[in-house]
Amino acid sequence: MDKHTKAGYEESEFVDKMEVKQKYGKMEVNQTAIEGIKAEKVKTIAAPQPLACIKFWVVVVSTMLLILWVCAMQLATLDEKIMVPKSAFYFPYSFPSQRAYKNNGYLIISPNGGLNQKRLGICDMVAIARYLNVTLIVPKFAHGSYWNDTSTFADIFDVSHFITSLRDEVRILKELPPEQKRKAASEPLYYMFPMSFASLEYYYQRVLPRIQKHEILLFAQTDARLANNGLPEEIQKLRCRVNYKALRFTQPIEETGRKIVTILREKGPFLVLHLRYEKDVLAFTGCNEGLTTEEAAEVKEMRYSHDGWKHKPIDSKRKRERGSCPLTPEETALVFQALGIDRNTTIYIAAGEIYKKEKRMADLAAAYPNLVRKHTILKPQELEPFLKHEDQMAALDYIVATESDIYIPTFGGNMANAVEGHRRYLGFKTTISLDRKLLVSLIDQYKNETLNWDEFSLLVKKTHEERTGKQARRLEIPDYPRQEDYFYSNPQECLPPTTSTFN
């Protein structure tokens, strides 16, 4: 373990052994100069002088101290000049006043996983920083995931907007202040893995004392570290505010995503299909429906080659029957036809590289010839800046998915949850949540001719009549947070009122 890294596992059962290395850039505050000026003026006042002269200098010094105080407050509020990008896709934003509070310490976070796992983790961390009255440092993305995307927070999100739009709730800095930066470089950095789906009491009782003791604390993981339910409404609304207002994509990502939407809109209404059939998804889940023996062996080998993925046999058939596998492209084509989706609908595929796409996409392409992707809509030079960055490519898909007329994911996950919740927030836009467990049963019955087409189609439609992203109460299962509805898929505390009541 690095000599500058101090593990917290000796004090807590939920801290694992891990070497964490963080690099900090430079940030300078001319505090010494300010203090020097103050000291010099005090010395001047103390010298024996005639009464009139003393009165004059008292007025001068008081004025200068007032000016210095105002400047210091401005420096504390903004660590650099705020520049709001000018774009047709950006709306005017009135920045709030800074909230004053006693700082309990500094929280550094290292969001892990893909784009949306990082995004939702950041929302939780802002809420936690606000609750604990600590200063949050702009996220430093972990780059050890499967995708190994080197994009930074600033490559994906508008940093200045993030900092300034939340300043009435929590203080956010790009870097540690100079004193704390020197401390982090010269002393062990205390870190921990916060408990999943934790309550606010957990953070107050177990985390805050550690921050107060060590001054600087690193959260090495941020995914799903705050409870779905049982939190004050103001905390829930802050999570939404961060997600839907503060986390604004950079101007290049925003404008490119909007351009895709504009081109699609010119053709009429469009549907976004989040087709989760990439090789890594099949490997991670262990699902091999429709794969040859050689293909199944190939994805299994990939699973065993990655630390942290299940290195034991997986019963693919049983997982599929439980609804725990993504629908195949062939199954998706049958479901779309059964739902009555028009053959001429423009369908945007939001996904990575489909595994064995030439073979596996044939049925879907035959049933729906207007399949499009980023690569077929944009010119190569327009997409080129994002091609080697999976998170930035995912950001483009996120924009298109939230703006589409209909959104249908074929598997769960962070993007499916994030987009569904965002579309509810935008006014309950149609999101069809497929009941995979029932669908695979119906598909198998149709294929073995237990059901005819009309029966199959009717049952598929009936099953999904109420699974369209309408207003509904979030499912709560006390003591089993992983099985209940995820907060971000249905953030009911933040949603617009409707004339209907909760189901």
Image (cartoon, rainbow, N blue to C red):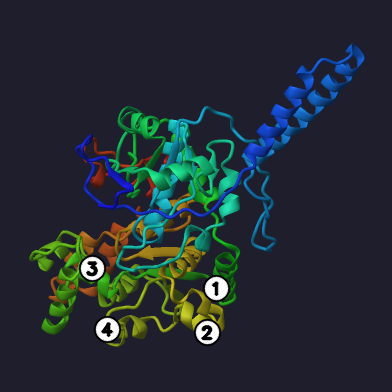
Question: From this viewpoint, is residue 379 visible?
Answer: no
Q: Residue lying furthest right in this view?
A: 52
Dot 2 falls on a residue whose secondary structure is: helix
Crowding around mark 3 (Cα neighbors within 10 Å: few <14, some 14 to 19, many 20+) is few
User: Residue, x 85% and y 22% (percent of image)?
Assistant: 57
Q: Percent x, y for residue 223?
A: 33, 50
* Residue located beneath label 3 in the image: 455
Q: Quadrant of the C terminus?
A: top left
Q: Percent x, y for residue 266?
A: 59, 75
Q: Are marks 3 and 1 in contact (CB under 8 Å)?
A: no
* Residue located beneath label 4 in the image: 356
Q: Earlier in the sequence, mark 2 or mark 3?
A: 2
* Residue located beneath label 2 in the image: 380
**Disc 1 versus disc 4: distance between alpha carbons?**
26 Å
Indicate left or right for 97 with 237 as reference: right
Q: Is residue 446 above or below residue 154?
A: below
Quarter holding residue 472: top left
Q: Amino acid at mark 3?
A: Glu
In this view of the protein, which residue sits in the foreground, 502 or 200? 200
User: Residue, x 49% and y 68% (percent of image)?
Assistant: 396
Q: Earlier in the sequence, mark 2 or mark 1?
A: 1
Crowding around mark 1 (Cα neighbors within 10 Å: few <14, some 14 to 19, many 20+) is some
Quarter holding residue 468: bottom left
Q: Amino acid at mark 4?
A: Lys
Crowding around mark 2 (Cα neighbors within 10 Å: few <14, some 14 to 19, many 20+) is few
* Residue located beneath label 1 in the image: 260
Instruction: Between label 4 and label 2, give the one nearer the viewer.
Output: 2
In this view of the protein, which residue sits in the foreground, 466 or 379? 379
Q: Are marks 1 and 4 in contact (CB under 8 Å)?
A: no
Q: Percent x, y for residue 327?
A: 25, 69
